[in-house]
Image: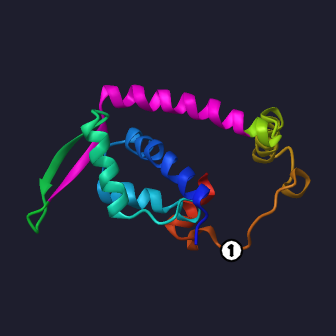
Amino acid sequence: MERNFTGQFKKGALELIILCIIGSKERYGYEIISELNLYRDTLGEALEGTVYPILHRLHENGLIKFRYGEKSARGSRKKYYSLTPEGEKALSDMKKFWLQFSECVDSALGIRRESIEMDIFALSERQNLLWSGSLNAEAAGFEFDTDNPAERTPEEKKRSDC
C-alpha cells in the first residue's frame, strides 16, 4: 500500500506534468497516458479514470483546448489537446513555483543546489571531453551497459534520455 504522502505529492504534480506534456506539442488522450506511463515507476500507472477528469478540469478552467481529428476507419475521431494562452501562462507560473518550492524543500532536506548544478556541469564537461576524443571513457568515470541499445524498449530508451 502506498504511503499517503507519496500519493499527495503525485496528485499535486500530475496537473503540472500533464500541462508540460501538452505544452510540448498537441496530444490526444492516449498519447498523454502513454507519456505518463513512461514514468510509472515514480508516478504509478496513469489510468483513464485519473487523466481524463484532469483534462476535463483543465479545459473547464480555460487552460487547454481541444479539436477533433479526422475520422478513423472505425468512424471514431481523436480529441487533440493543446494549451490556450491562459494555459501557457499558468504552466509558466507553475514551473516558477515548482522551482521555488523544490528549492525550499531541498534546503530543508540539506540538499545544496549549487553542488547538484556543479555535478551536472562536471558531468557535461566530462561528456564533452569524451566526445571530442580528449578523454577515454574509463578516465572520464563513465560506466557502460553491455546490453545492446538497439534492443531496448521505447520505454527504456525514453528513460535513458532523461
Quarter where residue 78 is shown: bottom left
Relative placement, left or right, of 49 versus 46 is left
Residue 152, given in percent of the width and then of the height, sits at 57, 71
- What residue is shown at x 29% (from left), y 35% (from top)? 61
Chain part drawn in magenta: 77-105
Q: Which quarter shows the N terminus?
A: bottom right
- What residue is shown at x 53% (from left), y 32% (from top)? 95
- The answer to whether residue 80 is above or below residue 106 is below
SS of the residue under disc 1: loop
- The answer to whether residue 85 is above or below residue 75 is above
- What residue is shown at x 56% (from left), y 62% (from top)? 157
Q: Say which residue label 1 marks.
A: 147
Relative placement, left or right, of 140 versus 89 is right
Quarter where residue 123 is shown: top right
User: Can you name the residue that lies furthest to the left here?
Assistant: 75
- What residue is shown at x 54% (from left), y 52% (from top)? 8
Asked whether residue 98 is drawn in magenta, I would say yes
Residue 66, given in percent of the width and then of the height, sits at 22, 42
- The answer to whether residue 93 is above or below residue 147 is above
Out of 54 and 83, give the one closest to the viewer: 54
Q: Main secondary structure of the magenta part?
A: helix
Out of 53 and 126, give the one closest to the viewer: 53
Out of 71 and 44, give the one closest to the viewer: 44
Asked whether residue 76 is drawn in magenta, I would say no
Relative placement, left or right, of 93 versus 136 is left
Kind of residue at disc 1:
Asp
Quick one: label 1, few (<14), some, or many (20+) residues within 10 Å? few
User: Can you name the residue that lies furthest to the right here?
Assistant: 139
Report the label total: 1
Relative placement, left or right, of 110 versus 66 is right
